[in-house]
Amino acid sequence: MSSTTLPVARRPLALLFSIGRLVMPAIVLFWLAMAFFGHWVAPYDPAGIQDADLFEGISRKFWLGTDYFGRDMLSRILAGARYTVGISLMATSLAVTAGVLLGLAASAIGGFFDTAVSRFLDALISIPSKMFGLVLVAAFGASIPVLVLTLAVIYLPGCYRINRSVAVNVAALDFVAVARARGESTFYIMIREILPNMVGPVLADFGLRFIYVVLLLSSLSFLGLGVQPPEADWGSLVRENMPGLPYGAPAVIMPAIAIASLTIAVNLTIDSAFGRHAREGVR
Amino acid sequence: MNATIGRLLLTRLVAAILTLWFVATVVFVITNLLPGDVAQELLGQSATPEAVAGLRKALGLDLPPWQRYLEWLWNMVRGDAGRSLVNGSPVAGLIGSRLGNSLLLAGITALVAVPLALALGITAAVHRGSVYDRIVGAGTVLAVSVPEFLVASAAVLVFAVQLRWVPALSQLGRLDSVLDVIRTFALPVLTLTFVIVAQMARMTRAALVDVLSSSYIEMARLKGAGQARIVVWHALPNAIGPIANAIAFSLSFLLGGVIIVETIFNYPGIAKLMVDGVSTRDLPLVQACAMLFCGAYLLLVTMADVAAILANPRLRHR
């Protein structure tokens, strides 16, 4: 935030932290760009079998080795960004939009509506997210639209809880009372009075929610219950290359590192943008 | 005073039971919402209408939904989870034969993870603001942002492929010596520990930092008490409630981790059973496993609440 006046880092650790402050958002932007352009940037055809051995190691020709069909791993990871980042972004946007609107409505309307929605969604939180995912996939299958909806439904309650608690605090302020006295509609109060005053927490929550969604989607795909072949997100890439693990093939570990790089980068970007305490209490 | 605690605990218990009932309802509704017909799906497209109707009757699908719901709920309460759609054997038996394995894995993990997390959390809180504290803090953020299967596959790469200390897959069966037990459980337990220690250490640190910043600790310090005495004698007794809360809450993360770990190491537990059930769409099995996991989760969360109530004098006097 106030990075302009920072003195030259005195300790190596502090230097490391300030470098991280620049690198982390860059990693996030890189993966976002790959979600759109990954297919074009990929050095080889992601689905094309190359003239190579199975589970090849890292080489100048194949930067991240090859997979169980002899396909180029780097290309497959870049192409997989579309699914991992794309599905997660859509699901998170859905969950956060619905969570914010419901939270705003609960804080602006209050009374029975607030109690009913809060009780219902709070009870849903008591289903562990992976379990919820498994039950939903068992019932509805794992096509991509279903996955997006599944992930959105799972993270809606947590998102609602955070946004409601922020919105309730804003709704208690004087200018909201003034707007009510002016006779503004509930919708106007929600969108024009309360929402602009909670943009920071909403964005921080969006980032954290995105991390959870990426991790859950990857886990489901890893279990073979997420994105289905021939399409492959990063979790599926780990799964399909598991036979290479005994040979120490990079094909297993590289997609997993891609996931970790994305989630850690988002996590630390939120930290430096909103402060560490923004994460507390979110779950 | 005791009546207040009793009432609080009773409230928690009733709330937990009501929540479990709600969860059961959600699980039932989700698994029965599908427009398709289970009987049709089981028999395939070429089945005669009579055969489908017969199977529908046998499965109780011809009854109205609310009647099926009540019957299902009552059977669940009695511990009768019905029969597997895939191989026809009773679900309760399938689960029963594997429950012990999962509990063993979870138990060993808890034995390893809890002392480790407490040590990390307490030392980080004592040396608050130091390089060590920042490293532990950064480490916990990393650990919660990383998928479990990355931890697991990295552990296999290092300890099974490079160092060849342990086999890559756990095989239950030949547990003749202590060494066998260690070799079988090392990697699954290592992975699970990694997953839950971060959360537990962070919450422990927060609880202790809270206590250490109160004025009676400053008083003890002014009195000339040593650092170790302050932490062990003055601070820890008042942090036990929040720490017990942290332990119970973090152990609930085991339930998520165990799903990945049992799959990756091919460990014959109920999480593996459930994942297989989901991929074959064996709904009775999935329902029963889901209820078991949600029940365990609620139990741990309720225990966390109870620990917080019992240890907090302010709550006791409310």
Image (tube, grey):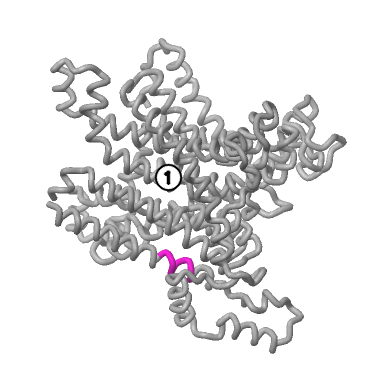
Identify which residue, A115 or A30, lies in the foreground: A115
| Residue displayed at 68% across by 45% down | A239
Residue B26 lies in magenta, yes or no? yes
Q: Residue at x 73, y 86 (%)?
A: B48
Give the image location of residue B260, x and y in percent: 58, 47
Rendering quarter of residue B228: top left
Q: Residue furthest right?
A: A51
The residue at 67%/38% (across/down) is B168
Q: Quadrant of the N terminus of chain A?
A: top left
Q: Left or right: where does residue B268 sit relative to residue B77?
A: right
Residue at mark 1: B251
Please state the total of marks drawn on the protein image: 1
Question: What kind of residue is marked 1?
Answer: Leu
Q: Is residue A117 magenta?
A: no
Q: Is residue B154 left or right of residue A7?
A: right
* Magenta highlight range: B23-28
Q: Is residue A82 something one can see in this rendering?
A: no
Q: Residues within 10 Å of mark 1 (few under 14, many from 20)?
A: many
Horizontal and vertical percent for residue A72?
Answer: 77, 37
